[in-house]
Structures are given as C-alpha cells and as structure tokens.
Amino acid sequence: MYADLVLLNARIVNVFSGEVIDGSIAVKFGRIWRVGSVDDVIGDSTQIVDVGGRYVCPGFIDAHFHVESSMLTIRGIAKVIIPHGTTSIVIDPHEIANVLGIDGVKMFIEESEDIPLDVYVTIPSCVPATVGFETSGATLDLDDVKKLLSLRRVVGLGEVMDFLGVINRDPILMGKISMVRERGLRVDGHAPSLGGGLLQEYISAGVHSDHECVSGFEALEKLRCGMWIMVREGSLSKDLNRVLGHLVKAGVDLSRVMLVTDDLNPIDASKSHMNKLVRMAIECGCNPIDAIRMVTLNPALYYRLDDEIGAIAPGLKANLVVLDNLKTVNVHMTIFNGGVVARNGCLTVDIGGWSYPPKACETMNLKRLPSADDFAIKVGVERGRAIVNVIGLEEFTLYTKHLTAELNVEGGRIIPNVDDDVIQVAVVERHKATGNIGLGFVKGFGIKFGAIASSISHDSHNIVVVGSNWSDMVYAVRCIVEKGGGIVAIKGGSILEILPLPIAGLMSDLDAGEVSVKLEKLYDASKILGCRLHEPFMTLSFIALPVIPEIRLTDRGLILHDPSDKSIRFIDPVKKIIKIQ
C-alpha cells in the first residue's frame, strides 16, 4: 500500500518533544501515516510535494471564535482564514443564537459541513447574556442544550458569561454546566476582572477556561487557580502583548495557555489569522515551538481533540501548515485532511455557497420606528443643568469607564455636548416589538456630525446608534431596518455609507473582499463624522454587552457593574438636576 501524499524535505515541528526534526511525512486516507523515512510508501500514484526545507507544523486552531463578528458566513470566513494556515476553529455561535435561537445554531452547523475547515462547536450557555437586563430574540434553555449536545462536532459549553449566575449557583445555569461536564466536555468561561474568592467560586462551579484577561497579573492568578487561559488578540481587544508578555517574563509553564482571536473583522481576517498571533508570541519572547503549541497542541488537549488534531503523529488528521520560517511565520501552504487547500495565500479548492432560509433574513421586528423625540432624555425642568452618567470608551479593550458629565437642559430635554465629546447613545429593541429604547450618553467616539448605527449589538443584537443629533440617529435606525440589518453612517440626513447585513442582522451574503471594501468606506465615513477610534463599529457593537465592566446600555436601560461585589444593576442616566430660573 502506498501513500496518497508525501511531503519531502521538511523540517518537522514536533510539539510533543519540542524538537524540529528533518524528515518527510506520508499521508493516507486523510491521516498521517508515516513521519520520518517514507521512501518505501511512495508509489506511482503518490502525490509528492517537496517543501524545500520549509517548516511543517500542525494546522492552526482558533480555540475561541465568533464567526458572526466577521460579518461573514462560515463559508465566507473559511475562504479567508484557510490560506493563513487555520485548519480548525472552535465557534461559540451565541450571536446568531440570540437572534434565531436553536435554529440559528443548527444553521451554522449545517453550513459548516463538507468544507476544508474543521468547525467545532461550543453550545451557547447564556442566551441572553443576562436574564432581566436585555431583550434577546430567543433563549436557549436546558432542553435546547440537551438537543444540541447530540449534534456532531460539539466539544463543550460556550463561554458562561453570566458570572453572577454561576457564583450564585443559578439552578438553570448549573444544570447546563452539569449536563455538559457529565459528557466529559469542556465549559468555557467568561470572567472579566474576577479575582480572589469570587473567582474561585466561579471556577468551583465547573468552569475550565477564561479568555477575558486584560493583564498578565489577572491571567497569572487564573492560571494558578487551574484555569486554561485563552489570550485574546482580536480586531478590538488587543491583549496578547500585555498578557502573554507578562507570563513569558514570569517564566511560568505555558502548556495551559492558548491564543485566540474572539472577534475579528473581515479586513483583519483577510490579512492574517493565527499565523499573526504566533508571530506576535515569538516577538514577545516566547519560544517558537511554545508559540506554535498555543495554537495547536494546547487547544487540542483542552477540548480533548488530541486524538484527532493538534500534532504531527501517525493516526492524526493530516491538517498541516508549511511555513517559510519560524520568525515571520509566513504560510506557504495549508493542507487539510491530506489535501493541499491553499498555496501562497490563495485557496486551491472551491468552497461552494450555502443558502440561509428566509427566516434568517426576517429579523427586524420593531413596534415602530423611533422619532427624534424618542431619543431625548426628558427631565422635570424646562431649563437648567444635568449631572449625567456617561459610558467612557477606551481604545483596544472591551472595558468601559463610568464617567459623569454636566450637560445643559433646554425645553425639558438634556442636550448632548458635542464639543466635549459627550453624545447621545440609544439601543432600540428589534426582536419582539416591545418598543423599548434604552437611552444614555457616551464619551470617546469623537463624533462631531451625524450618526452611526448597527444591528450588531452584543449579545442580544438590538439596534445601537450614537450621534451628534437626534434626527440623524432616527434616519440611521430607519436605514438599518429597511436593509434588514447592517451598519450605516449618516450625515445631514444623507447616507455616507451602508453595509447591509441581511442574515440575522449580523452577516452579509457577500464575500470577504466586497464586505471589506464596504467596511473600509464606513471607516472613512466615520472619520468624516469626526470619529477618532480605530475600530468604531466594533466598539459600538459592544456598548450593550452587560457582562463586561463597568457601564453599559441595553434596550432596558443603563447598567452599572458594582466593583465591590461584582453585581450589576440598573442606574438612571441622570444623577442630578440643577434648575435655572
């Protein structure tokens, strides 16, 4: 019997021993058959690829990835990340689940069949992210989790974001955790800024990992408590240098550390994926093989997939990456199930399309379109000053700061101060026609004119809009609804740019190139409006996520994290009114 594929003259990265060994690799039936000497298994029909002394390592794994954040479908994102050496992703489809429920998760699983990318699934644990603080399009209960556990490629429970529910041992949440653990599967965590006793209470409930560390000290505490750490480097939250750099300097064992992207826009995904994270880890001082382990063996071990993927050894799937070197980590070739699927940055196979059912494209259900008056925060005095709570934005992080500002009151309405960058933000419910509109103020966008809006609004994905004036905010929401979802920039009642996202109001049916062009134009439009953020639309999309500190806005109101006990509660956007006669 002869091999189907042989890679000759390879420098093989052995993630078990930590060595780089010169040799060859033989593949049969999509799996690694021989490593080392392969001359006796080369036949007339064997495909021979001479890699010319390049490095061959296991296919890269992104262990925590939200496809929906790319605004592409699974097949759309697969087309751009496979050439970067990614052969496996572990998705948490809680974005589409918040809109379409269990049907949305099943759609993702069906779409991921028969493509040259292994798509493993963690079942969304918290849909919605918090109970009683937001309105989602659907919920996932214990019965839904049980049904999803029977599906192929399910490897665990998705990030358990309701950390207060875990700490307080909410019976439904604990039932989900127990159900998954009884099957020997992993429970992914979400524990932003948790430490001390509260962290240990969270872990003791059965949570295995965390991807929310924003400092090395936080990561080290969680690592010492037995958590697996997923170091995040995405389009918005950029934690790798800060977190991994600290761990490397501390000299700790990195076998329970992984690198993940979490949320990646299509522009960044088209340029690089896990190959960039490996390069950054090496630049942080990480040993190159340790850096490769964090995107291969470590995630495979974590999700108990190491008998399938994560290394180069007989019997494992022939998911391989050929690298030019271990410094730039430039990907020369990607091999999936023993076949060459990408070479020199280009796909060599066709990935066909997949049609979403009409239900997935009919997700705008507002009670009515808002008016300008709906966006005004009204108070009981005609004229005066108002001390208001403000959402303070910070670059390159999902965290916000709780600020205050003093604004004018005119005609019984609080007037945003564009000059001081304190502008209006609103979240408009779009799933159940409740008519809910959450109102607040935000600082950090720098918008001087117009408005921007999006139907991507984690995690319940209502419509979020910010602007310098209420009339442009109204028009922005109207444009989103008319397109069935999307992102838009408005100035003076005119559309500067719009990206329709008709699939669940989250994703486009266009390819990555077309979506990226639209998104670049949206970035340009945001600059015209005065915005100074590097990622304004992803920043906008996280304003409504109540499970990340410090202050958030949902369709039900303004939410504050109490640092003393990590509780969350509603607060009034207005702290104090000063009447002027």
Image (cartoon, helix red, strand yellow):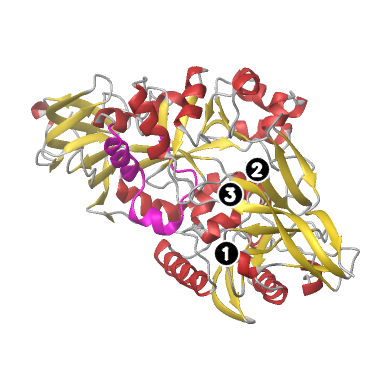
Marked residue nearer the N-terminal end (3 or 2): 3
Q: Secondary structure at mark 2?
A: loop
Q: Amino acid at mark 3?
A: Met
Evaluate whether residue 552 shows in this view.
Answer: yes
Q: Is residue 269 magenta?
A: yes
Q: Distance between the Cα atoms at labels 3 and 2?
A: 34 Å
Secondary element at tag 1: loop
Q: Left or right: where does residue 196 sit relative to residue 283?
A: right
> Disc 2 marks which amino acid?
Glu
Tag 3 residue: 107
Q: Could you tell me the amino acid type at mark 1?
A: Leu
Image coordinates for residue 294, horizontal then vertical, percent: 36, 31
Based on the displayed image, in which of its 4 quarters is residue 59 positioned?
top left
Residue matched to label 1: 501
How far, Cα to Cα, is label 1 from label 3? Answer: 16 Å
What label does residue 550 carry, if any? 2
Residue at 23%, 33% in the rendered image: 27
Q: Which mark lies nearer to you, 1 or 2?
A: 2
Among numbered discs 1 and 2, the one appearing first in the sequence? 1
- The magenta-colored residue range is 259-285
